[in-house]
Image: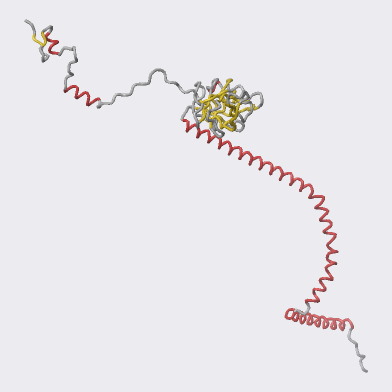
Amino acid sequence: MALPHKESSPIFADAAVGTLRLMGYLALACVLMVLDHRNDWLHRARYAASVAVEPIYRAAAWPGEAVHNLRTAFTGHGELVDENRHLREALLLAQARLNRMNAIAAQNTRLKQLLDTRRMLGMDVQLARLIDVDLGPARNRVVIDAGAREGVHVGQVVIDAHGVMGQVVEVLPHTSVALLVTDANHSIPVVDERSGLRGIAHGSGAPDRLIVSDIPLSADVKVGDRISTSGLGGRFPAGFPVGTITKVGPDPSGMFAQASAKPAAALARSGEVLLLRDQPEQVGPPKAAPLVGPPASLAGSSGAAKSHPPLAGEASPRGARAGAGHRLPDGEAVSQR
């Protein structure tokens, strides 16, 4: 009896076909990869596929970008505000430090000029600082931080590195008030450094103008001449710069000339000043010059070797011993028996 023929299972048949198909696809992919690597055949196809797929990528990424933008807009605003505030504070602090450094540099320059002036003068001066400035039409005064306790007295001359500023008119224990040369109540004897003409410079009340009045019409005074203290009156020492002539013309009466001058001192800019101390004046005639001669040791030895000759009307030692005898022409005395 013949046995019935058994047909193979379709499951295994489909698996074999799928395996063969997969191997064919892999082989085709390898061939295409090699050909594309060597000849770049699929570049156009790949570029077209990328262009077609790009909108899909953008659409898929849009929700995430929108959420990120919203989060940045709501949460980053406060951080930006804080950061902006901190940056503004840092900028203001840096500007303040820079301005302070500029002020310190300017102060150092002024102090150096004052020290140079002190060395150049070779006089006893006192450094002081301005603590208040009153420049107005009524009066021109400054307040300095030195008073009676520091040795300041009324009438002391105040100068800066450029010229005469004024004089002390009021003294308190630790502060003093100085009247500036531009005050309407101040006058100072001056001399024209070029022509030697003397005059009196009065304050005009303006902080940048002096008036030299009662100048003869024929006097040699020109614009640009420098005027300095003449030393007359004994208050202001001679030779300190006072100002520069800026204008010369007749006075209201027409009988004299009048000149305007710009003060030499930096009245509106000085922060430190020098106070001139009174110089001791010599009393009586000057001291005699020392005698010039040989050293004391040589003078003593020569005096011992030689006897001092007798002066006129003076008896010699031998005559003195002889008593009241007659004197011979050669100066010898003969005693009387």
Quarter holding the C terminus is: top left
Relative horizontal placement of residue 20, taking residue 92 as reference (left or right): right
Where on the picture, by quarter, is residue 146? top right
52 to the left or right of 233: right
The image quarter in which residue 176 lies: top right
* Residue 105 picture quarter: top right
The image shows residue 119, relative to residue 214, as above or below, that is below
For the residue pair 104 and 6, the one nearer the viewer reads as 104
Q: Can see residue 187?
A: yes
Residue 144 visible, this orientation:
no
Q: Residue at x 80, y 73 (%)?
A: 47
Which residue in the rendered view is the most extreme toward the left? 337
Identify the residue at the far top of this view.
337
Q: Position of residue 75 (x, y in %)?
A: 80, 50
Residue 232 at what x, y percent from top left? 50, 22
Q: Is residue 280 left or right of residue 335?
A: right
Question: Residue 167, image x and y in percent?
Answer: 56, 24
Q: Quadrant of the N terminus?
A: bottom right
**Nearer to me, 252 or 207:** 252
Tell me which residue sits at (72%, 80%) in the image: 38
